[in-house]
Amino acid sequence: MELEAIRGSTPWTMWDVTIHPLGARRRHTSGQGLALIPNCHIPAWAPTTARARLHRSTILSILGPYHTFTELTREIPMEPEVSELPKGLHIEVVDLTTWVVLIWVATAILLLARQLRRWRSEDVAGQLPPGPRRWPVVGNIFQLGLGPPHESLAVLARNHGPIMTLWLGSMSTVVISSSQVAREMFKNHDVALAGRKIYEAMKGDYGNEGSLITAQYGPHWRMLRRLCTTEFFVTSRLDAMRGVRGKCIDGMLQFIMDASSRTSSEISASTDGIDLGRFIFLMAFNLIGNLIFSKDLLDPKSERGAMFFYHAGKVMELAGKPNMADFFPILRWLDPQGIRRNTQFHVEKAFEIAGEFIKERMESTENGGCDGIEKAKDFLDVLLEYRGDGVDEASRFTSPRTINVIVFKAK
């Protein structure tokens, strides 16, 4: 096949093709795809766009008995003349865009089929209760409607029974709408149902498995639960903290009085009234802070307490937001709403402040306590004095970060 090298950047046209026996001329090399093939025109049956011009996104393949030339991606102006190709040769014009679209469509179909097969296997293997038919990808999300969720669930329960399965995206949810069934589940089958769903906002590098709220059922969770039931929520401990609760309530009333004693000009300039819910939340937050750290976490005189309150409040706000990554696992690595990233930031900031409280208490304990002054034991004291068996449970809590995880997530 007579070939002539392309020189410069001038356009070139295609002319006649001469066939030589195999071995009579130079063998096929990688550079021949960019060579000049003289006097070969696109036939009349080729697409109109190909007859006019071949663009860079087009592959031109000339297939013959001995040679195959591909990937002529140079912009090639074509002459309008039409001539017949030599016998045994034909031209294929392939649009890369079409192939890319076909590949994407085939990949999407395969992924959808795989997801449907996985859903079917989960229904059979897990023996989930019946429920409304779900849509691909979104599940039963749209069947909940735009009204209050409890009303939508009550309507669905009338058609599908007191136990039904809903799919919120790829997350399976069993809905119980009967008090008798709920009593049976949580009284006789509580161990089998002790696992919990960990949402993306609660995952991170801060050790969510160490918390009583987010840890899965096991020795560590049982140890934390035992500490709470025997040391923290017993009647004697609650009676000992009666004065702390009274102090927190008095503080809340003082906050309300300060807010209501504004001047008439301030009240007329403001359109907002007194937010009692906020003051009750602040009171509960301070109560928990006193029970755990023996400190007012929201004290006008304490900058650290105010910062801890701010970051802890942001964590609770972000954890309560609906997160698309919880319903569609393919979005986890994207974190489209930034919930996990922002939660991680505020948790780390809260850990820094709480870590200072823990470090101060540990140093005070090592130095002999509070100079002989007796005080009510708080939850942090219980953790510092804990001694486990060292097998299934930790022998003791010596790491401020471990205590931080337990204390912060217990809030």
Image (cartoon, helix red, strand yellow):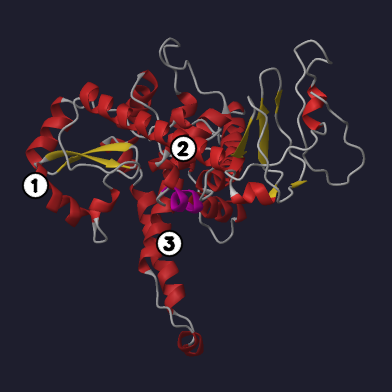
Up/down of 100 relative to 262, above or below = above
In front of the other: label 3 or label 2? Answer: 2
Q: Is residue 399 magenta?
A: no
Q: Earlier in the sequence, mark 2 or mark 1?
A: 1
Task: Please state which of residues 156 and 370 is positioned toward the viewer in this rendering.
Answer: 156
Disc 3 from disc 2: Cα separation? 47 Å
Q: Are marks 3 and 1 in contact (CB under 8 Å)?
A: no
Q: Which residue sits furthest right? A: 8
Q: Which residue is mark 3?
A: 251
- The three-letter code of the residue at mark 2 reads Ile
Q: Which residue is mark 1?
A: 159
- The three-letter code of the residue at mark 1 reads Asn
Check disc 3 and report its element: helix, strand or loop: helix
- The three-letter code of the residue at mark 3 reads Gly
Q: Position of residue 277 (x, y in %)?
A: 36, 64
Query: Residue drawn at (36%, 25%), measured in percent from left and top?
Result: 221
What's the magenta region?
Answer: 313-319
Check disc 2 and report its element: helix, strand or loop: helix
